Image (spheres, rainbow, N blue to C red):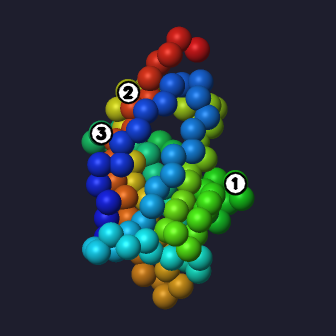
Amino acid sequence: MTTTGQNFTAGKGDDVAPIFTVTDAAAADIDLTNVEEITWRMYPLGGAVVLTKRMSVSGEILRPSPAGGQFQPVITAANLASLSGVYRHSATVKDADDNTSTVELGKFWVLDNGT
């Protein structure tokens, strides 16, 4: 099930790693232990992707509690250095049977904090 309203804010000089929990229609956590890929994307409203994080790339997506459905994209200050404003973000999960599902959607505000 896609969870919407996953909104968060960071400053240009911030390192952030928001935690998202994937759940089913009954709000039970979905086990991510054996998924093939998790992909998180960020893009301006009405625009093309400006940042992608993949579980298959070491250090880009953490899974603090895979059995509890949690994943965490690691977003660095360098990733945000040239960005400012409101962006959309989404994540997809590809399971062991190659089925891909969108699991979260939200907005991400990158604040120009003077750095």
From the viewer's perspective, is 39 left or right of 22? right
Q: Residues within 10 Å of mark 1 (few under 14, many from 20)?
A: few
Among the two numbered marks 3 and 1 on one chain, the one whose residue lies closer to the N terminus = 3
Figure check: 105 above or below 12: below
Q: Which residue is mark 2?
A: 85
Say which element carries label 1: loop
Q: Nearer the viewer, residue 98 or 16?
A: 16
Residue reaching furthest to the top: 114
From the viewer's perspective, is 113 left or right of 107? right
The image quadrant of residue 80 is: top right
Q: Residue at x 29, y 75 (%)?
A: 26
What amino acid does circle 2 point to? Answer: Gly
Q: Position of residue 36 (x, y in %)?
A: 57, 76
Q: Residue at x 62, y 60 (%)?
A: 64
Q: Quadrant of the C terminus?
A: top right
What amino acid does circle 1 point to? Answer: Gly
Q: Residues within 10 Å of mark 3 (few under 14, many from 20)?
A: few
Q: Which residue is mark 3?
A: 45
Q: Position of residue 6 (x, y in %)?
A: 36, 48
Among the two numbered marks 2 and 1 on one chain, the one whose residue lies closer to the N terminus = 1
- Whole-Å distance between the Cαs marked 3 and 1? 27 Å
Determine which of the numbered discs, if any, sits on residue 59 in the image: 1
- Whole-Å distance between the Cαs marked 2 and 1? 25 Å
Q: Quadrant of the N terminus?
A: bottom left
- Whole-Å distance between the Cαs marked 3 and 2? 10 Å
